Amino acid sequence: MQTLFASYGSAFAVTPSDTTVINCRAIYVGGAGNVAIKPVSQATAVTFTAPPVGTIIPINIDGGMIMSTNTTATLLIALS
């Protein structure tokens, strides 16, 4: 099995919002729950159901949002 490591130059805490636009390459999930995202502002929201605590979700959000609707996970960090 090949192990890939990504590095990130910055990180910032995220408060889920249905209107705040962000840009990042991944999301760290620090607390249990679901994470709903729109990868771009015009996209339909997608919910990651119960990712394990400590997971990094490698998804590029480019002018999208981490939605407050349907996001129950806590301690989210955007990595870019």
Image: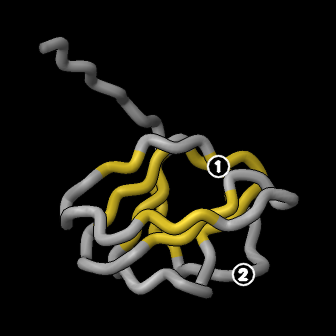
Graded by Cα atoms within 10 Å as few (under 14), some (14 to 19) or many (20 or more), the crowding at tag 1 reads: many
Residue drawn 27% across the image and 24% down it: 5
In the displayed structure image, the side of residue 2 where residue 51 appears, left or right: right
Is 15 located above or below residue 61 in the figure?
A: below
Kind of residue at badge 2: Asp
**Location of residue 55 by image quarter:** bottom left
Query: Number of marks in the image?
Result: 2
In the displayed structure image, the side of residue 68 where residue 65 appears, left or right: right
Of the two numbered discs 2 and 1 on the same chain, state the one appearing first in sequence: 2
Is 55 located above or below residue 77 in the figure?
A: above
Which corner quadrant holds the N terminus?
top left
In the displayed structure image, the side of residue 13 where residue 64 appears, left or right: right
Q: What residue did someone put label 2 on?
A: 18
Is 3 located above or below residue 47 in the figure?
A: above
Q: Which of 52 and 28 is in front in this view?
A: 52
Q: What residue did someone put label 1 on?
A: 61
Percent across and percent down for residue 24 are 58, 47
Q: Which of 49 and 15 is in front in this view?
A: 49
Percent across and percent down for residue 72 are 41, 86
Is 3 located above or below residue 15 in the figure?
A: above
Residue drawn 59% across the image and 85% down it: 68
Kind of residue at badge 1: Ile
What colouring style does the render use?
A: secondary structure
Q: Which of 14 and 48 is in front in this view?
A: 48
Percent across and percent down for residue 36 are 54, 71
Element at badge 2?
Answer: loop
Residue drawn 62% across the image and 76% down it: 67
**Location of residue 34 by image quarter:** bottom left
Percent across and percent down for residue 33 are 32, 80
Graded by Cα atoms within 10 Å as few (under 14), some (14 to 19) or many (20 or more), the crowding at tag 2 reads: some
**Location of residue 45 by image quarter:** bottom right
